[in-house]
Amino acid sequence: MLSVPLSAAAAGTVVELTEAERRAVAAVAGQLVAQDSAGGRIDDPCWLEAAREVSVRLPHRILAALRGFRHDAGPDGVLLLRGLPVVAGDPLPATPAVKGSVERVPTVAASVITTAMLHLGEVVAFRNEKTGALVQNVVPVPGSEVSQSNAGSVLLELHIENAFHDNRPDFVGLLCVREDPTGDARLCTSSVRRALPLLSARARAVLGEPRFLTEPPPSFGALDRVTPAHAVLNGDVADPNVLVDFSATHPLDDEARGAMAELRDAFVETMSALSLRVGDLAVVDNRLAVHGRTSFTPSYDGADRWLHRVYAHLDHRRSRVDRAGNGAVLG
C-alpha cells in the first residue's frame, strides 16, 4: 500500500494566479466557448486551431512557467497552476458517472486546459481510449471501484500514462473541476530524479535492461497485446527516463522483479501527494514522473471528484504514422 503523510504538500513548481491573471485566462477561454454557437466542437480541427491561436494570449507568467517546464521539468517533474477559472458564472453540472465520459462541447474548463497544454506540445488522444476525445473526464464510475483506471476509486498504482504505447504522452494535464468532498482522493507523484539516488547499483543496471513487459490499461478496452520486452530506465544513465506501470508492468525474471520492487520503494519514499482544489492544473512530465491516486469513497450523488485530462506530445511528427489525416487522434 502507498503510505502518504496527511501533511504532504505539492511537489514541483507552483504558480498561484492573481485575480487579474484569472480574469485574463477566463477571457481567453470565453473566446473558445463562443465557438460553440457557431457549431464548434472540441474535437473539430477548426476548434483546436482556434485554441492554438488564442493560447498565446494567456498571461505571460503562465506562458513562462509552461515554457520553462517544457525545457526542464525539474527534480519533481510536476508543475501546478493554481486558481484557474473552470466556470463562467453558471452552476457546475453534476459530476458525470458513466464510463468513457468526455467533453465534446467547449466549456471554460475544457478551453483552459487545452490552451495551457498546447504550450507543452500538440494535444493528442488515443482512438481506443474514451473514443479518442481530446478532453477526457476522470470521474468515479459505479461498478468500476476496483478498476486500475481513471474510473476506479481504490488505490491507483503509480504509473507512467499509457506506458505500453510507443507514442505515449510526454505530458499529462489534470485540471480539477470539482474537488473530492471527502478529501481522501489525492494525486500522488514521484520523480525518477528523486528516486534514482536511493537505488542500488545492481538495481539500476537491471532496470536498464529489456527484462520487462507492459500491458495496456483497462481504459483502452480489450487490446490483446503487450509491449516488446523493454527497460524500465532508459536514456542517459545519470538522468534516465522511466517506463513503468506498477499494475501492468511484469518483470521477466526474479532479479528483474527485485529491482522493480526496489524502484517502487524508492518512488514511495520520495512521493508527494496533493488534494487538488477547484482550478488546480497539475501537469506531470510523463517521461520523468509516475503518478497515482489514493483511495476514496465516492457517493455517486453528482458531487464527486471531477478532473479533466489532456495529453500533449512534444514531437508531433514522431506519431504521424499513427494519426490518420495528420489529425490529433492516434489509432
Image: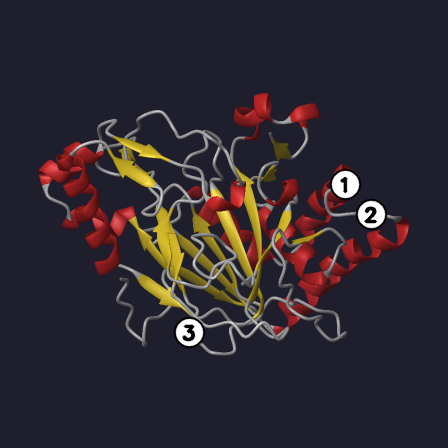
Query: Residue at left 32%, top 71%?
Result: 8
> What is the CA distance from the residue labelled 3 to the residue labelled 2?
37 Å
Q: Residue at x 21, y 60 (%)?
A: 269
Residue 270 in the image, given as x and y percentages of width and height: 24, 58
Spot occupied by residue 63 in the image (x, y as percentages of width and height): 57, 52
Tell whether label 2 touches label 3 (CB within 8 Å): no
Quadrant in the rendering for residue 46: top right
Three-letter residue code for mark 3: Asp
Q: Which residue is mark 2?
A: 40
Residue at numbered disc 3: 184
Work out how far the residue at label 2 is from the one at label 1, CA to CA, in angstroms.
7 Å
Task: Kindly state the secondary structure of the residue where label 3 is placed.
Answer: loop
In this view, the residue farthest toward the front is 143
In this view, the residue in front, 314 or 184, is 184
**Which of marks 1 and 3 precedes in the sequence?**
1
Q: Residues within 10 Å of mark 3 (few under 14, many from 20)?
A: some
How was this image coloured?
A: secondary structure
> Disc 2 marks which amino acid?
Gly
Q: Nearer the viewer, mark 3 or mark 1?
A: 3
The residue tagged 1 is: 44
> Mark number for residue 271?
none
Amino acid at pointer 1: Asp
Q: Residue at x 41, y 63 (%)?
A: 154
